[in-house]
Amino acid sequence: MQPVIAGARTGGPEVDQTSVPGAQLCLDFYAGLASGIAVVTAPSDDGPVGTTVSTVTSLSADPPLLLVCLSHTSRTLAAITPASHFAVHLLHEEQSGRARLFSTATPAERFAAESFEEVLGVPVLSDTFAWSVCRTEEVRAYGDHCLVVGRVAALHTAGGRPLIWHDRGFHTLAEAGKR
């Protein structure tokens, strides 16, 4: 397969320099990335909202900042505004059902099946690998998603093994020496 290179310089394979990879080629590439699965929640005027995400990363330890990517169409993104708070929940390897629930069900269905408490006014799910409540520092649009930067205001870690997303499916980490 011939690579598609946007703005390629000389010295590589011959390509049409005006072509750019299409969305499907990019999604196929992104499927090769492995990432932990998280649920992001926030309060809204209509009750708690939340969604499953696979793009969460540490941004800074000092000050403590997290970065989350949310679709422009996300109800959760609509609830996250500058100076508001949201929560990031890292899921245990056994919680693929919770990840599916927060990616497919209605907001009411998502929280009807969940046990949660409020921390700094944000719904925090019980029984997760870890959670953090963040104050929204910045929301910036890029393509079909927004980058949301949050300053960590509260957190809890329970330990365990994370749920992983790779090749469009849920996976678990192999035990050391059991490959």
Image: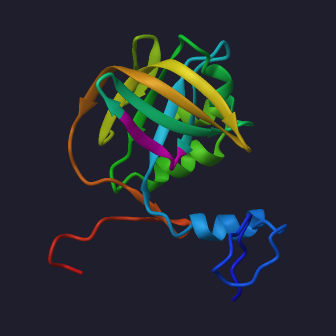
Residue at 53%, 45% in the rendered image: 53
Q: Position of residue 38 (x, y in %)?
A: 45, 43
Q: Which residues are magenta?
A: 53-59
Q: Main secondary structure of the magenta part?
A: strand
Residue at 47%, 35% in the rendered image: 67
Q: Position of residue 151 (x, y in %)?
A: 41, 21
Residue 106 visible in the shown view: yes
Q: Vertically, is 156 above or below 56?
A: above
Residue at 63%, 80% in the rendered image: 11
Q: Vertically, is 92 above or below 18?
A: above
* 106 with respect to 86 (left or right): right
Q: Vertically, is 113 above or below 21?
A: above
Residue at 67%, 16% in the rendered image: 46
Quarter of the picture containing the N terminus is bottom right
Q: Position of residue 166 (x, y in %)?
A: 48, 66
Please tell me in which quadrant of the rendered image residue 14 appears.
Answer: bottom right
